[in-house]
Amino acid sequence: AEALGIENDYTIMVNSNMSMPIPTQQTIISNEIDLTPFSSLGTVISVTLKGIGSDVPAKLTKETTSLELLFFEFADKQGVESELLLYSCNGKRYSYKTDKTARQCGIEDGDVIHVSWRAQEEKKASADIASFIYKHHQRHKAIKIVGDQRKARRTINDFVRRGIIYRRSRKRRESAAIIQKVFRGHSARKIYGEKVQTRLVEFRHFTSVWKQTVEAAAERASAPPSLTGWALVRDEINMKKAEEEDEHMAETDEKLSKALAGALEEEDEVEDEVIEDESDLEDEMMKNNAIEAQEKLAMIDWSQFQVTSHVCKFLKTGDTKYREIFVKKMTQLAKGERSHKLQKPLQGCESVIYETYLENKSGWRILWTQEGDRLVIWFVCQHKAVSRHSKLIDDAKNRAARQQLPDSFIAEMKNGITPHKERMNVKLDPYGNVPLKLYDVSFDNVNDIVDESWTPQMHLTEEERNVVETKGTVLLLGRSGTGKTVCIINKMEYDRETKSKNNPAFSQLFVARSRQLCRYVQDAVGNNDRSTFVTFDSLVNRIEASLSGSINQNFRRSRHVDFYRFKDEFYMPAYPREDINALIVWKAIRTFVKGSIDAYQETGKVLSRENFVGLGKNRCKVPLNMRDSLYDIFLQYQKWVDDEHLWDDMDRILALVKSTEDARRSHSPVYEEEIKKSRLYVDEVQDYTQLEILLFFYIGGGPGALFLAGDPAQSVAEGTDFRFEDVRGVGYFVAGDKTGNKRHLVPEKPKVVNLNFRSHAGVLNCAGGFLDLLFGYFPGSAKQLKKDHGLFKGARPGVFQGVQVQQLATFLEEKMPGAVVLTHDDSAASWSEKLDHRLVYGIREAKGMEFKTVIVLDFFAELPSSLQKPWRDLLLNRYREEDGFQQKFPLVETHLKLIYTAVTRCIDQLFFAETASSISGDAAVRWLTSTSTITDRANTNGALATINDVDDLEAMSMTNDEFCVVGIDNAELAECSSELSNENILNYLDRAIHCFLKAQSPELVTKAQVHSQSIRLRDRLAHTNNRMEAGGVEQLEKEAAEIITSLLRENLFVESENLLNSITPLVSPYTQQKLEECVTSPIHNIVNA
């Protein structure tokens, strides 16, 4: 009814079709409630509701009538609200809202439903509840009090009991501990007392001896990573020269400053404002140069410009703000904007050099020139260094012109000189006689310079592009000073640009014998996560460490056999009267019997007698009649090596090649991740045997991944006889099929570079004369090339014939203190003592170096007596090819290569000095100074050298900086050459100290002296008997600790590590452990950072 909106007293109309009559509205007179008409069929029961007002009977259907309806009807009859009432029946209470039926509530016919007021019941219930709660609280309170009392008594009892027990147990424990302590102390003293006392003594000893060393190592380890050793000194000197160039060029800068007085003044900070109040002098200079400059600038192709490697270094390492300003300035120039600050010609320069203000406050300037139709940016430098850098640019651009000889000498110098136009196409680096490295930058992409990932495109000449873009393995052949290393640098940069973008796994590895050369290439190429630069010795150590699980033999350094050990301990004692020279035997064993690809293919990995004797005469220079005897010597040598448990380089390389080959075939993760490289670059490849070159092929992952550069004419290393054909032979072996579809993997014939950047034409002509002899009498010893072309003209070498030793010593001391003397390696030390001159090198020792002035001393006088007449006949052309000179005197080939190497060490002044008369020496003087005995006379119009008197020569001066550079060169060789003997290293350091003294640099003298002390101590340690007295060992340990501390303070970490490795075996195990933790490990991390 509620849902339909039906209220009380409403009339419901019923349709006439319904069977029931329509009820009419009438007043209910009866007090009875009848709910049966509103319920469906079921059992009708009667109940009585009483308790409020009069009793009310009610009828309802047991199964279907809701009690809620009953309670509502009752409340209505009583005139009250239903929710005010409370109902109960048979002990159960019901709410007025209950929807249950009588059946569900258990109400039967005749039951009484008691009705009461809800408020009264609730009040009563509340009173009952309150009474119950109160009684319960009182009871609980009483119980709690009793319980607390009991708990308190138990707690007190427990506390007292535990206290008693604890005190008793503590006394027992203390007593037991005292007993145990006494017992343990007694037992420990009995068992370990001696060891504990020893350890305490060792700790105190270690602290007293090594404390300062540990502190120095910790201090150096906490410093930021940087260059170490002598490389750091060179870098610091370069930075100092860049920052303080004006101080070192005082006289030059004084002259330039007068010419640039008005031109180099600081301007207003408003960058593009036109200066109206310029001085009259500057206005006049600008006016005079304006027309010529504008005409030249009109020719520039403004679509792109070129920057040098020096500018690239500045842009990559400089502040982002400067890169943005640089881009802005270049854009302004390209758009044709001109102002005093954008395009200011420098006055006082031989060539036209422009200056652009990069930024006023900091004083940075951009120096650029016009080269043809290109704008070349040479430097970005500080304002105070503008005069110095402009001078360097002038020297680089005009070096050939500045070194022209007078016209009277031109006729003598025509042979081997590049035509003028050809030379002018070569741009030289301002800092040396190497090609200027340029990069192309397009003005369309100039904004990319701001990006830190910007990489410019390398500019290549046609000849350079022909080398670097060649696919597959590249062999590069060039004489000394022709820029082979520069080609490697260009190739590495080109590969990095073209290969690394699409290949995330791309990697490069540069290998050389000299660590100094590795550092030079690394500095030129730049550091990169994908490029690695290592010496060959370091490479071998790394591979050996990676494959240590598959290499069974232990190659201890003390068991190593080199040429000198072979000669002194085996060959000379066993064959004192043998006619075959020890070097020839060693070279044959190392190059052919054990180190050739033919030997590797033999079952025992050693070339058989039959195959050795059968080698072609071009392949092996050993005469046929000597080969059987030489093979017998090899068999005795191998027996001596096996009996003494020794090893030589070929044994070690063979083990590495076999292990690397197995790892390569099985695609071992070690090979793929640690050994294999995408590209491998090797310099001075003529110093490697075929077996070592095979290792390169395996590291490079195949023949197509190698770039090998070298010069067989400089193959003077002991035990190596190199030809480029040998590399191709290794390529055929790796390809596996000489006629199949893998032939493309075999390297092509070597590419050739002829332009010499080191020496002038006078030196090159002399070197070419010795090469003519080499090629004429020893065909096949090295590939014959066209004559080297020098960029500069220069004076012919001088000859001192019959010069007295004391006279030469005075000459070196008074006139040429910086000159380098080259002689046979065996006599270098004695000549250094006789002349009292530290810059004396053996020729092999000086290989890879270059010097401003060179004196080749007694080369011919010290030749073996058995070769004096053959050398005379060779020089005077008395032998014919059919006479078999090559087979009779094979050692002369090595001597020719030595003299060629000695000559090509020279940059400027070259002299031959013969202090004693000899058959070959007199012939050499005649050959050098005569116009009638020179071979290949068709291309020669004059003598190769001139006779000089020592007393008539003018003094040659060297600056402090030049002495410093020479000293650092020697110090770096001492630090980097791990294969040198201690004696040779000390010679390098003595020369370095001599140069630093001449340079008046006490800091560098101290550094070199500390280095020298360490080498001398290492030499003593190498000959120390392990059974020496404890006092002697302790003294050596203290000395080593002091020197290592000094080495660390001087940043000579490599030598520190070497000395630590030498002293460690002599100290106690505890000291060894502490040194490893506190000193060796931090130094190792610094060295390999």
Image (tube, helix red, strand yellow):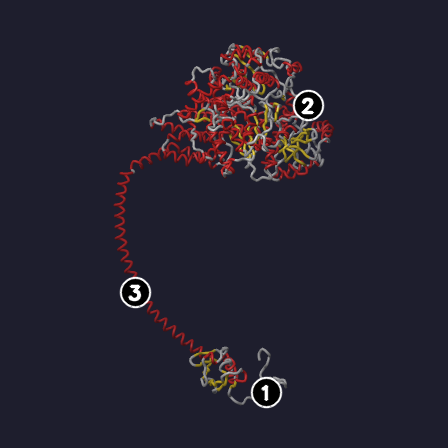
Q: Which mark is residue 421?
A: 2
Kindly identify which residue carries mark 1.
Answer: 23
Three-letter code for the amino acid on which mark 2 is drawn: Lys
- The kind of secondary structure element at disc 1 is loop
Task: Compare residues 888 and 752 and report the one nearer the observer.
Answer: 888
In percent of width and height, residue 152 lies at 30, 63
In percent of width and height, residue 1030 lies at 33, 28
**1068 to the left or right of 894:** left
In percent of width and height, residue 652 lies at 46, 29
- Residue in view at x 36 percent, y 25 percent: 1025
Q: CA distance from mark 2 to mark 1?
A: 136 Å
Give the quadrant of the N terminus.
bottom right
In percent of width and height, residue 816 lies at 54, 17
Q: CA distance from mark 3 to mark 1?
A: 80 Å
Disc 3 versus disc 1: nearer the observer: 1
Kindly identify which residue carries mark 3.
Answer: 150
Task: Compare residues 151 and 897 and report the one nearer the observer.
Answer: 897
- The kind of secondary structure element at disc 3 is helix
Q: Does residue 684 appear in the picture of this structure?
A: no
- The kind of secondary structure element at disc 2 is helix
Relative to 677, residue 793 above or below: above
Three-letter code for the amino acid on which mark 3 is drawn: Arg
Q: CA distance from mark 3 to mark 2?
A: 120 Å
**1058 to the left or right of 940:** left
Relative to 25, residue 621 above or below: above
Task: Compare residues 109 and 366 and report the one nearer the observer.
Answer: 109
Three-letter code for the amino acid on which mark 1 is drawn: Pro
